[in-house]
Image (cartoon, rainbow, N blue to C red):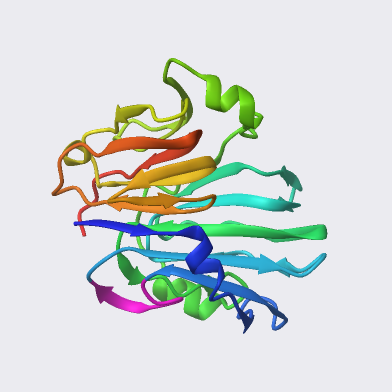
Amino acid sequence: MIYARSGADALAERHDVISPGTGLQHWGTTFFGPRTSTSRAPGPQATMSELQAHEAIKPHFHGVTMFQLFIAGSGTIGNRGQALKPLTIQFKDRHTAYGPVTAGPQGLSFVALRMYTGDSKPIYIHNKDEAKEKIRPSKRRNVTSDQIHFSIEPLLRARTEAVWETALEGDDSMCAKVVRLGAGMTVKGPDPKIAGGCYVFVGNGSMLHDGDDLPLWSMIVVENCEDEFEIRAGENGLEALVLQYPNEDL
């Protein structure tokens, strides 16, 4: 199937949540699926978390492979304090620990994108017995991109050729790319059948789909049973992240 969600519609349902990782109140938005889950269900799972200033989430892992996008504010990740600036892409295999994730003085917003709803409940490393019980084999990749920069509106709108840039790439079809399109331009996305499916995320401008003009932070999910998806820019152009997932033995 193909799933679409407007960023504006999703953010209209932003709500307060208590973080299981910090015990603090921050803000959550659900794009697809439940906010957290412990069992398999049809369809993708995508959520946004917006952290308080200086809030820190302890090291943990999830049972589902995901891309994570750090889209606003600033912060650090890992014990070495790697900087997180908008927009940074992270890819993390299932059962792969990462963190801490610490927000800067203006807070930190990030989106977790999963191709399917699975065992996404965070398992914290400091809970050693639970972590030992839940951990499973995986490739254990935890990689982040360089900062993605976006175009000013008139330059984006005036583009006449599609530009593709690779931000992350693996040897098993995992790939994160940026596509830059001028006003009204269209391109074919990757073939989802050669991978585990993909997300298309609006980082700048807007994307047209089924008569809707999808604004900033909107997303489309293309499962790997579908044909190549046509990415269509809105009237001011589009810069989108195309996030391709590896095939996994589920």
Q: Position of residue 170 (x, y in %)?
A: 38, 33
Residue 40 at x, y percent in the picture: 26, 73
Residue at 33% x, 30% y is 171
Instruction: Name the residue at 58% across, 69% down.
Output: 125
Residue at 32 percent across and 70 percent down: it is 118
- Measuring from the top left, give residue 73's x and y in whole percent: 74, 53
Mark yes or no: residue 64 visible: yes
In this rendering, the answer to whether 6 lies above or below 132 is: above
Comparing 59 with 169, the one in front is 169
Residue 110 lies in quadrant: bottom right
Identify whether 79 is placed above or below 46. Answer: above
Q: Nearer the viewer, residue 198 or 238?
A: 238
Tell me: 107 left or right of 13: right
Judge from the rendering whether residue 227 lies leftward or rightward of residue 199; answer left or right.
Answer: left
Q: Is there any visible trace of residue 142 in the rendered image?
A: no
**Left or right: 137 in relation to 68:** left
Q: Check the image and report above or below for 110 versus 164.
A: below
Q: For the image shown, how many numbered marks are present on the structure?
A: 0
| Image quadrant in which the C terminus is located | bottom left
- Horizontal relation, residue 78 to residue 127: left or right: right
Q: What residue occupies the far top of the structure in this picture?
A: 161
Residue at 65% from the left image edge and 34% from the top image edge: 147
Write down the region rendered in magenta: 33-41
Residue 117 is situated, as x and y percent measured from the top left of the image, at: 32, 69
Compared with 188, 77 (above or below) is below
Is residue 244 highlighted in magenta? Answer: no
Which quadrant does the N terminus fall into? bottom left
